[in-house]
Amino acid sequence: MSNPAPRNRRAKPAVVRRTERITPHMIRVVLSCDDFVDNGTSDHYVKLLFPQPGVEYPDPLDMGVVREQFPSEQWPTMRTYTVRSWDEASHELTIDFVHHGDEGIAGPWAAAAKPGDKLWFNGPGGAYRPDEDAAWHLLVGDESALPAIGAAIEVLPPGAKAKVFVEVEDETEEQKFSGSGDVELTWFHRSGAPGNNAGNHAGNRGDGLVAAVEALEFPPGDVQVFVHGEAGFVLRLRKHLFAGRGLARDRVSLSGYWRLGKNEDGWQAEKAETARKEREAAGN
């Protein structure tokens, strides 16, 4: 019997049009892409594929073929990134990258990217978009969640009320967003000067965000919540929102994008192991 054909996981190509450093540690890369399909979410994300040095892959890049024909150490490295924006008319796909020198894979790639460079990706995925019927919105995150938070702010219905808490390194990492919602944005800093509109020091990672949400007097009415970023503070707020505030799970979007001290590969492996143990526990 012949072996089954490898699963078709053909990646989509994109080409760099231009780049811009929008803050000292955030690089915006605008890509030309004909194959992106907008799924209607504001937190849509893609899986970027970074080739291993010196390895020649089939073109078009198909991960089913790669996994069938290449040893695992030669597989492209995958990194998950939120789409900052998609312009259907110009076919421009914009992705923001946090950059900390030579650390990591995606950040250094973005820092070196130039017009004409090719990038392969899979996706998009995503599940969240501000609900027009919500009485108000609460958005919480660190710089890894800024692209999704910015995208959400910019699609809020006119006059929609939102309270937004964001933690970044210092005041130089703050960004401005457009949109027609009624947005109250508070910045928290892990170092440097206090936040410019609230005088907030974040202290340990996520402490300021957790304290702010715990102390917040929730306005009346149905709230839709978005909490994404480093897994430690996301877990702390998960407990507070469900056990402390009694919110319905379908009104809260939670995602630990990364965990302090782990790269994406290690964090994804940890999440998969946790999910396996939970499934086993549920079956006992």
Image (spheres, rainbow, N blue to C red):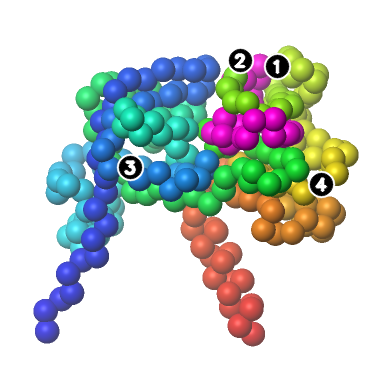
Indicate which disc, 4 or 3, sits on the residue closer to the N terminus.
3
Is 249 situated above or below 191? below
Residue at x 41% of width, y 34% of height = 86
Q: Residues within 10 Å of mark 1 (few under 14, many from 20)?
A: few
At label 1, which amino acid type do we have?
Answer: Gly
Q: Which of marks 1 and 3 is in front?
A: 3
Q: Is residue 81 magenta?
A: no
Q: Percent from the top left, x then y, of residue 134?
A: 71, 46
Q: Name the residue under label 4.
A: 221
Q: Nearer the viewer, residue 77 or 153?
A: 153
Q: Percent from the top left, x then y, of residue 137?
A: 71, 40
Q: How crowded is mark 4: few (under 14 residues within 10 Å), some or many (20 or more)?
A: few
Q: Are marks 4 and 3 in contact (CB under 8 Å)?
A: no
Residue at x 67% of width, y 58% of height = 250
Q: Name the residue under label 2.
A: 172
Which SS class for mark 2? helix
Which SS class for mark 3? loop
